Amino acid sequence: MLHDHGFLRELVAMKDEMGVVSLYVDAGPRVDPGIRPAWEIRLRDDLAAIRARVSAWPERVRRATVLEHLEALEPEIARLVDPASPGLGRALFAPVCTGEIHRTSLQVPVGTCAVLESTAYVRPMIAAMATSAPAGVAVVSRDGVRLIDYRYGMAEDVYRSSYELDSDDWREMRGPGRAGTERRSSAHHERFRRRAEESLVRYLQGIAPEISNRMGALRWADVLLVGDPRLTSTLAEALRPLDLIQVDRVISDGPAGDVVSRVSAELVAVRVRRDTALVRRVVDTARSGGRAVLGLGQTLALLNEGRVDCLLIDENGRWRGARGPDGFLYPAEQVPHGTVTTDEPDLGERMIERALESGAEVTVVHAGAAGALAAYDGVGALLRW
């Protein structure tokens, strides 16, 4: 399944007046076959709370319909919490009235919870996707270049190119008519070294267009060039103007997942750097009177008008607010006088929904990059106009 903003927009389009059941679970191996795992206990507790809330509803038909739906979901819930099922982070979305079941999984944590609302609950999914957005790891060595695609916890080899020294250079090193001779002059060695280096540079420059095309096709948010800095610098120069991060580390060959795990700290750091740059852009643009806003009140006002192009929210932010009869969202303390509103205890979820519904991008900002947003309620946006 392709996890992108299109996928998220499909989720927020999932609406049901009776309710949409959204289930998330972080699964792991069962330690004791006779004991329910902790994640299942947490999910069951949330489901019990939902059943208790629904049982108190006064509308008999709605109450019975939702409770029957929850009961009918039991086989799906059992599958969701089964340690043998695929995926570390799993999610299930089930509108009450349609009987549809939408399942997905990632290889990164999504949290464990059960939610019943009129729309699918997407914040855990978009937050998990932000932690592991598509990235590329290019391992550069004297043996060639290896590209690894890493997204949402899964690592996969997507390209390998092997380098071999030109045969003419090899003969030059050995010397004409001197096969097997170990004695070579220092001038001979230096000449060969220069020719070998020049050959390697030509090789890296020659494969740069192919690598650039693959990077574009895979839509990597970040790219690490890993290896000897003399080699990564050469390839980085050939790939200009692409924005690449060089990691001075020689990594031995191995499974793609093992390679990515060895640069996991660098992948987090580059996400923080990317988010920091975006936050700085929004702050600077807003302060200079450009197409950007800061703070909950202004951002909500322009979300209501459909003018937001990219919404930024602090990953640890929590907001309360209200919804008007026209669907407009307001901060809790800024409801227009005389407007009848409904309380929105999870305004962050509503902001995400509104942005995605209008075709805007949403960036969940890493806590390490959100400092400049702290003075503005942890919220900001780039605008369309």
Image (spheres, rainbow, N blue to C red):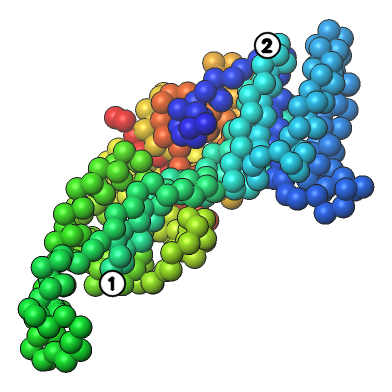
Residue occupying image coordinates x 20% and y 89%: 182
Disc 2 target residue = 98
10 Å crowding of disc 1: few (<14), some (14-19), many (20+): some
Q: Quadrant of residue 31?
A: bottom right
Q: Nearer the viewer, residue 179 or 164?
A: 179
Q: Which residue is mark 1?
A: 229
Locate residue 326 relative to residue 310 in the image: left or right: right
* Percent of width and height locating residue 195: 11, 73
Secondary structure type for disc 2: loop
**Where is residue 272 drawn, in percent x and y?**
44, 57
Q: Is residue 69 above or below residue 330?
A: above
Assign the C terminus to one quadrant of the image.
top left
**Amino acid type of disc 2?**
Thr
Element at label 1: helix
N-term-proximal mark, 1 vs 2: 2
Residue 20 vs 313, above or below: the answer is above
Q: CA distance from mark 1 to mark 2?
A: 56 Å
Near-viewer residue (235 or 207): 207
Tell me if mark 2 has few (under 14), some (14-19) or many (20+) residues whose alpha carbon lies within 10 angstroms of its own: few
Residue ID at (39%, 72%): 249
User: Relative to residue 376, is residue 229 drawn left or right?
Assistant: left
How many marks on residues? 2
Q: Residue at x 37, y 33 (%)?
A: 309
Please provide percent x and percent y for residue 274.
38, 54
Q: Quadrant of residue 143?
A: bottom left
